Structures are given as C-alpha cells and as structure tokens.
Image (tube, rainbow, N blue to C red):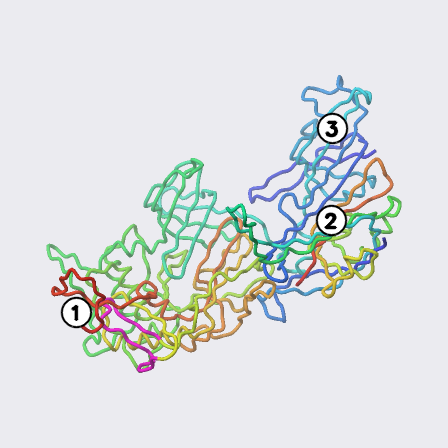
Amino acid sequence: MVSFKIYKEMKSSDGKSTWSSVGITLPVNIEDISVQTQALTNVVAYGETPHITPFGVKGKDGRVANITGTYKNRSMVFVRDGMEVISVQDTKLSGYVVNGMAIKVIGDGLPELGDALWTINNITWDRQATEGGMWRFRLQLGYVWDVTKNELKLYEDGVGTNVRDNVKFFTVREGGHQARVYINNPKIETTLHDLNRARFTLPYKIYEKEDILKIYCDTDESNAVFYGIVTNVSNSSNSAIQYECTEIGTLLYRKPCAKLGAGIFKPRIRIPNPYKGVQLTLQQIVGTILKFYQDSPIKGYNPGPGIDKTGKWGASPWLPGRENDAYLPPQILSGYTVGKALDNVLNEQCGLHTWFDNNTGHLEYGFYRNIVTIDPSTEYIIYSEQIQSLAEEYQADGVILMDNSANNPTRYPPGNNKGSYIQYQFSSDLTNEQLSSIARRIYNDIRLANRDTFKVKFPAGTVRFRDGDVFSGLGDSTVTPRLPYRGGVDQDPTEDPSDSVWQIREMVITDTYTECTVGSTYFSIFDIYRTALKRYDGCPAPIETKDTETNVYALPARESTNT
Amino acid sequence: MATTFTEYALNITMAKDGQNGHKGYNETEICSHTVDVTFSSNTRQVNKQTIDSYSQTTAPQSIVLGYQPEIVKLEGILCHIADVENLLAETAHCRAVNTLYNKFLPCSILVCQSSDVPELVTWSSPNKWLVDMFKIKRSKQKPDLILFEMVLMRWYG
C-alpha cells in the first residue's frame, strides 16, 4: 500500500512553476506500474551509414509513468459528488486529486517513481461488481524535471544549465499608453540585406497602423529585440489579430532627398566631391544625406549622426578598401529617398552594411556589427545544418559579363576562349572599363571556398545576437556536413577575402528558438550587386532596329542587325 | 542471457579542442551495467524511394537512398525488488538523480562488452549503441521482479 503527497502548481509571473503541498492521499494498492523514457533524436537516413543527432528527451511525453491501482477503503456511497476516486486527507484546497496536480510517493514502497514529483496528466477509473465494488484507477503521470540537475548527462556540466524551453516577449508602445503587452506567436526576422520585420498576434486589437513599438524578451528587459512601426493589422487564420511591423529605419524611405522651400521645389540635389577643394569623408556624406530627414523628422524618430562600426572608413575620404586609390565619388541624389540614398552610398558604393540600433534607432554602418562570444550556459548550439552553398555549381575557367543592352559581352580572362565559361548579365548599362572590372571580380569571387551558409539553432531566449554580428568562435563537429570551426581574428573583408569568422547574415527569433544563418563576412561581388547581377544563359541578342522588319524567321546576328 | 555494457556519456561540449563555441562530443566512460536479457529483436531497414508503375507488366521500381539505424529491442529482468538498493549503489557515483528509471540514460552510448545476444556484439566496429528508449515495469503477475525494456540504435558517430 502506498500513499502519495499531493501538490498544486503555482504559476509565478515569470512563467515558472512552483509546487505547493496540499495534502496526502489515503493508502492505495498498486497493481501495475511502468516508467518510460524516450530519447529525442534526429535521424538522417541517407548514404551508407545514417547520421543521428541526439537532442535529449522528447517534449512533454519524454518520461511518463502509468499506474494501475485499486482503492478498497471507500465505496461509492461515501464518495461525495463528482465521484473522484482518490481523495485527499488533510486537505487545504481541494478534496480530490485532479489533472494538473502532482504527486510524490511517501516512503519507499514504489521505487520506480523515486523521489521525484510527477504531474497527473490523466485519471480514469472504474468499479467492478465482481471485485466487491472495488475502485480501479489508472494514472498517467508526467515527470517534473529538476532544471538544477544535469540528470541526462547529454551535455557536459555548465552547458545549457540555465535555459528555458520557451520565453515570453512583450511590446511597449512609444508615446501614449506605454504599458507592457505580452504578445503571442512572435516571429522577428532580421537580415543583413534589408530592414528587419516582426510579426505577432494578440487576441484583441490594441495597436493601430503607424504605432511605434519596441519588442522585448523577458530574459533581457533592458535591450529591445526589435524597434519598428506597425505596418499592417489583420485577422490571422485563427481569428486573432496579427500585427506586422517593419524596422524603424523605414521612416527614412518616406523622406525625399529634396529641399521643399517656400514655393520653390529643388529636385536636383547633388553632393559635390571634392567640395571647395577638399575631399569629403564618408561620415560627412552620410551626415549630409541624413540632414534631409533631420530637418523635418517623422514621428519624432531620430536616426542619429550615423555610427561608423568600422572605426576607420567613416573618417576617410577613400572608398573602403581602396585607400590611396579611389576617392568617394560625388553623389547625385535626385529622386532618391534618404534611405535609398544611404543604401546607394554605404551599400552599393562602399560595400558596407547598415543597421538600426534596437534601443535608440540610430543608424550604424560597417562590415560587421559586434564581436560576440558564445556563453555555453545559455547559448549552446542545439542543431546546425548546411543550407546553401553559394558557390556556383562549377568553377568556370572564364567569365562573360554583359550589361543591360547585351551589346558588349566582356570576357575575363581576356583573349582566352578555352575551357568552361559562366555568363552573367548586369541590369544596367556599364562602360567597358566597368564591365571588365566587374568580370574580373566575379572571376576571383567564384574561386573562393568560404561561401557556404549554415543555419544554427540556439535555445529560446537567445536574443543577444544581432544580424551583422560575428562570432569570436563558432563550429559544430556533430553534424554532417560539419560546420567548420572559425575562431579567427580576420573580420574585415577588405583585408583578406579568405575570412576566418562566421557572421550572422539572417536571424529568426521566436518564443521557442533562435535561428541564425551564418556565412562569410566577405562582401563578394554578388553581395554588392545582389539584385543587379544575374546568371544569364542564352544568346546575347543585340537591340533590334527599325530595319529588322521581315517575315522570314532568322536568328539575330551577333555583329550586324541586318536580316 | 547476461549482458554487460560499458556506458559512455556523450558529454556534448561547446569548447571542443579548447575552442569556445565549438560543439562536439566528448565521450566519457561513466560506468558499466550487467543485466539479464530474456528477449531481443533486431530491425534493419533501408530508406528507399519507390517509383510508381502504371503498367501491368512492369513492377514498381525503387532506389535505395540510405539506411535507417539498426535497432535492437531488449527485454529482461532489471532486479528483484529486494535488490533495488544494491542495484542503485552501482550508479550512485555517476547519477545526478540515482533512481531506477535512470539506470540507463536516454542518448547515452552503450558498448556491449559481452553478451549471449549475438546482434549486440558480432557486428564489427563501431560496436556502440545509443539508448533510444528505456522502460521499467512491474505487474501483479510478478510483483517481486522489476522488468525492463530498452530500444537501442546503433551509434555510428
């Protein structure tokens, strides 16, 4: 005969549970018991030998116990309404054991359950007349893991010792009512190449389009994970209200690089360089562009002066990586918004990335953002996999590049017509010198080996990293193909394209995991012209002219437009 | 069929070869176990892609893509109810929670040292098994015996 101590779950505001004793059951007789622990693994069944990735114990059913017991001391007439089979003596809160409560064995009469606390997932019972009206009940129990103990020994001591499997996110609106609102299904997507986005749902409508929000994770309430503006409010599939947000920097794309004076519209805007005989620095050009916005800011947002994360090129008049070679060119800003003009200068001309600080909203630019060091106690790798090899499918012996009109295919190396070729088209018109220069850069870049991209999954609440950060050390030797360890010090792509660190290129942050896409810091020609440069396969047709009118089908000639 | 295993913890580290941020295995020998196995079964399965056939004269074809891990299921006697204390004493030095359900830890690696179960020992190196499931059970038919079931996956890592 065994008695159980009964506990009731108390939820605290941080989502953690504590268990409070509420009484003891009368002795029951145990007929059958089983305790099962199921591992959680990922099996890749390809090739000669499968690859197994062990994760630990499977979710809520990882360790379960099933008990069949009998209870003779009470007949039906003595049981109060509700017909609960297991009564609790010395009760404080409830006279009956119900689902959601937890039990612990008193004494050593049931060693299978040990000293652990088990939650009651399900209770069923019946009575059989042939057994004298005896109650028979079945309990399905779930194990309450003690997070302070490295029970499974899957990870070494100190790794993942203070990790929760889910976290809460909350929003705070700027201006007006600023109370915290805890949100559901958050998904924050950040990328090196675009403004960050966030989505979440709430059961009610509290925000309107154009509201400015910050999103925080409850593991770090002083640093926002996202700072942006609500761009869409709609019903999601389950009728909850879904909010979509775009990063705060989107406001820079609403302001033109133009001066709207009293009755005078000045659409042609240019930043001359050199100006009065002096070469402007990158920071001066950035500051000049930002002034178009700061003269009449939107919604009070201030992007700041532009923070140079390279620590070098902001104060330099040279194009990054081309010191004593090429000055920053003059800027024609007509028709550009402030955001697009900054993209043009920083991204396309200088090969830098741009970010907006999640707390201040200040503009930052550089090759990388911050150097982050893994803290294994909270930021261990759950899983990693190679998702993309950005290398072309073959290493061509030569490159052919043509511009938008396809009139002027340029070969690199020039003059060599042997071996395999790979052909690209640039989406705007270029001079011969530009074509030749870009073709040479493509030829060199497709020979780089470090262009593989991996997805790396971290536990929930890993919100310290930002897109653009580089890891001081990251690698995974437990997967196939391996995520090679890179722990070098070469973070600057202008120094050496064979970089030795992993950079976060994209991130997905949710309440159950954080996933980083990591790749090379090297800013290849394909990064610089990611929208303009395309693989092209076909005959580079010349522009048709008015004398091509004919009813005879003919292939256009390469050198002549006459048919 | 007395079977003896040596148990290794995978001890996943984030500092493989002294490099912070580098995930790797650091297999550590923990202890050994001897259990009485009364039943074993072995499953080997290929992972194949079948190509539909719409002809009455051509059989459907398939391509072997790879192999599922070899699986061995064992059943046996863990201990007599009177010997629980002695059994737990064997693992007292290496278990954070030293109980019957932790006699074998999920995701730990077992190396079979000796057994009368041929499939556990006859295969060439690596002779390692990952604990996929471990279950203890007792019933009123044999209330004095604590029985076990265990599912092992061959560990190729």
Taking the spot 33% from the left edge, 78% from the top edge, the residue there is A412
Whether residue A548 is situated above or below residue A221 in the rendered picture: below
Q: Are marks 2 and 1 in contact (CB under 8 Å)?
A: no
In front: label 2 or label 1? 1
Within 10 Å of disc 1 (Cα), the crowding (few <14, some 14-19, many 20+) is: some
Secondary structure, mark 1, is loop
Looking at the magenta stretch, what is its main secondary structure? Answer: loop
In the rendered image, residue A124, in percent from the top left (x then y), is placed at: 70, 29
The residue at 49%/50% (across/down) is: A510
Q: Is residue A416 magenta?
A: yes
For the residues labelled 2 and 1, the Cα–Cα distance comes to 78 Å
Q: Chain of mark 1?
A: A
Residue A492 lies within the magenta run? no
Circle 3 is placed at which residue position?
A86
Residue at the disc numbered 1:
A561
* Mark sitting earlier along the chain (1/3): 3
Disc 1 and disc 3 in contact, CB within 8 angstroms:
no
- The furthest residue to the left: A263
Mark 2 or mark 3, whichever is nearer to me: 2
Q: Nearer the viewer, residue B77 or A307?
A: B77
Q: In the figure, is residue B138 to the left or right of A183?
A: right
**Which residue range is magenta in the image?**
A399-417
Please tell me if label 2 and label 3 are on a single chain. Answer: no
Q: Is the residue A499 above or below the residue A173 in the image?
A: below
Residue type at the position of mark 3: Ile
* Residue drawn where x is 23% and y is 69% of the image: A429
User: What residue did someone put label 2 on?
Assistant: B134
Q: Which chain does the numbered disc 2 sit on? A: B
Q: Nearer the viewer, mark 1 or mark 3?
A: 1
Residue B70 to residue A316: above or below:
above
Dot 3 falls on a residue whose secondary structure is: loop
In the rendered image, the quadrant that contains the N terminus of chain A is: top right
